[in-house]
Image (cartoon, rainbow, N blue to C red):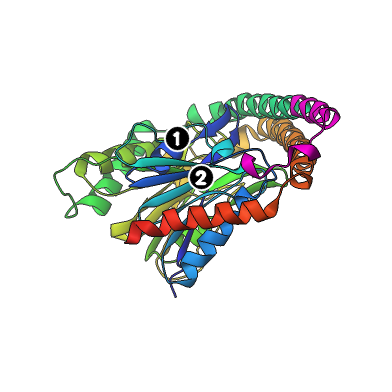
């Protein structure tokens, strides 16, 4: 049975700071409903309830999860209705100049200001400062980890046969695309399949690829050309007019980790840690970049150096994750102040307004 819900991230906590992909993820919609207001006023809960209501009616929904709390939603898209809903706090970019309408709903109106004293506001401001600091430390640790990862990659880049890598790319382009070209260039849709969270790396790869007929698991080492291969495949796909979903790395968004070709029912993805999977059904296959493009014995030649780098890298990633956990705890405190001062009867009225605007699209 094909799942009637797709799960993504459109923002991430990365080595380049907070990174947003909502511009691409929400492209082509007729309407975007923007929920404004402070945290703790019921926005994520409303988005979840509306998503569940649509799926109960048999409609397809795209859920966009929070990297701070993956069980919560930052936004959703009602696919058939071509309507998106997003928490303004989670989205740095809103489609205000696109072809569709942008309508705002102010959940701050549900706050009872009597419950937010001057003293409470002072505590919230202090916590917001601590939250910014925790995020900054997390991003700094991720950035350091990325520099260490670059050291790791150098050993393999120096051992790579680039001619073999180019040949492999051309083989895949021929195998995957010939006969499917439309002659009209297209633009890929950019998303994250996973994120760095307070509990470590989290991904939706298995759910996103569950209904596909073919899955190509790319194996290899850092610097063995996995992301470069995916970038070249993505560029060729867009040029030849084949629909593609382009998934960026949640650690380094300048790198790619997966491509999905919906009309080809095919996915090709980096299947190495921290999102390492193995073939387990018909249509699964492995593409080993180490075997196909590297000089034999590279692992053994640099074993001691690589082991030391891996240890430093792992330590920095754990450090960054610990700062995200601090950020989540601080954010929870901030939310609790606002939740205590929220009139949820007004939130329910707002939910009905949002639902009405959403469903009016189908009339």
Q: Residue at x 29, y 40 (%)?
A: 187
**Region rendered in magenta:** 108-129
* Cα distance in 3D space between marks 1 and 2: 9 Å
Residue 109 forms part of the magenta stretch = yes
Whether residue 22 is visible:
yes
Q: Is residue 124 above or below residue 50?
A: above
Residue 331: image quadrant is: top right
Q: Nearer the viewer, residue 133 or 109?
A: 109
Q: Earlier in the sequence, mark 1 or mark 2?
A: 2
Residue at which label 1 appears = 94
Helix, strand or loop at mark 2: strand
Does the CB distance between marks 1 and 2 fall below 8 Å?
Answer: yes
Helix, strand or loop at mark 1: loop
Query: Is 228 situated left or right of 264 in this image?
Result: right
Q: Residues within 10 Å of mark 1 (few under 14, many from 20)?
A: some
Residue at which label 2 appears = 86
What is the x, y in percent for residue 358?
43, 55
The numbered disc on residue 137 is none
Query: Is 39 situated left or right of 219 in this image?
Result: right
Residue 252 forms part of the magenta stretch = no
Whether residue 45 is visible:
no
For the C terminus, which image quadrant? bottom left
Q: Nearer the viewer, residue 132 or 264?
A: 132
Q: Is residue 261 above or below residue 320?
A: below
Q: Nearer the viewer, residue 40 or 74?
A: 40
């Amino acid at each position: 049975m094909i799942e009637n819900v797709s799960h993504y991230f459109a923002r991430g906590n990365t080595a380049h700071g907070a990174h947003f992909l909502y511009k691409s993820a929400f492209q082509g919609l007729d309407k975007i409903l923007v929920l404004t207001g402070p945290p703790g006023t019921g926005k994520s809960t409303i988005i979840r309830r509306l998503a569940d209501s649509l799926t109960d009616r048999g409609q397809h929904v795209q859920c966009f999860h929070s990297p701070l709390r993956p069980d919560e939603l930052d936004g959703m898209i009602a696919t058939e209705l071509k309507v998106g809903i997003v928490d303004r706090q989670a989205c740095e970019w809103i489609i205000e100049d696109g072809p569709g309408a942008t309508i705002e709903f102010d959940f701050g109106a549900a706050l009872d200001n009597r419950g937010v004293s001057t003293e409470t506001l002072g505590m919230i401001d202090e916590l917001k400062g601590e939250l910014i600091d925790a995020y900054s430390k997390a991003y700094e640790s991720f950035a350091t980890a990325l520099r260490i990862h670059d050291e790791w990659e150098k050993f393999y880049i120096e051992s790579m046969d680039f001619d073999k890598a180019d040949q492999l790319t051309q083989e895949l382009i021929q195998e995957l695309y010939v006969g499917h070209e439309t002659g009209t260039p297209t633009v890929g849709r950019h998303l994250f399949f996973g994120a760095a969270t307070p509990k470590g790396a989290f991904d939706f790869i298995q759910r996103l690829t569950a209904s596909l007929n073919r899955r190509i698991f790319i194996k290899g080492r850092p610097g063995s050309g996995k992301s470069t291969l995916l970038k070249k495949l993505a560029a060729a796909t867009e040029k030849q007019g084949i629909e593609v979903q382009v998934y960026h790395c949640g650690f380094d968004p300048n790198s790619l980790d997966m491509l999905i070709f919906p009309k080809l029912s095919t996915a090709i993805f980096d299947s190495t840690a921290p999102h390492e999977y193995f073939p387990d059904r018909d249509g699964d296959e492995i593409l080993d970049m180490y075997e196909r493009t590297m000089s034999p014995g590279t692992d053994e030649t640099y074993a001691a150096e690589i082991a030391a780098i891996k240890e430093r890298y792992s330590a920095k990633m754990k450090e960054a994750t610990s700062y995200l956990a601090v950020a989540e705890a601080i954010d929870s405190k901030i939310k609790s102040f606002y939740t205590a001062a929220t009139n949820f009867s007004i939130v329910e009225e707002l939910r009905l307004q949002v639902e009405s605007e959403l469903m009016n699209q189908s009339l």
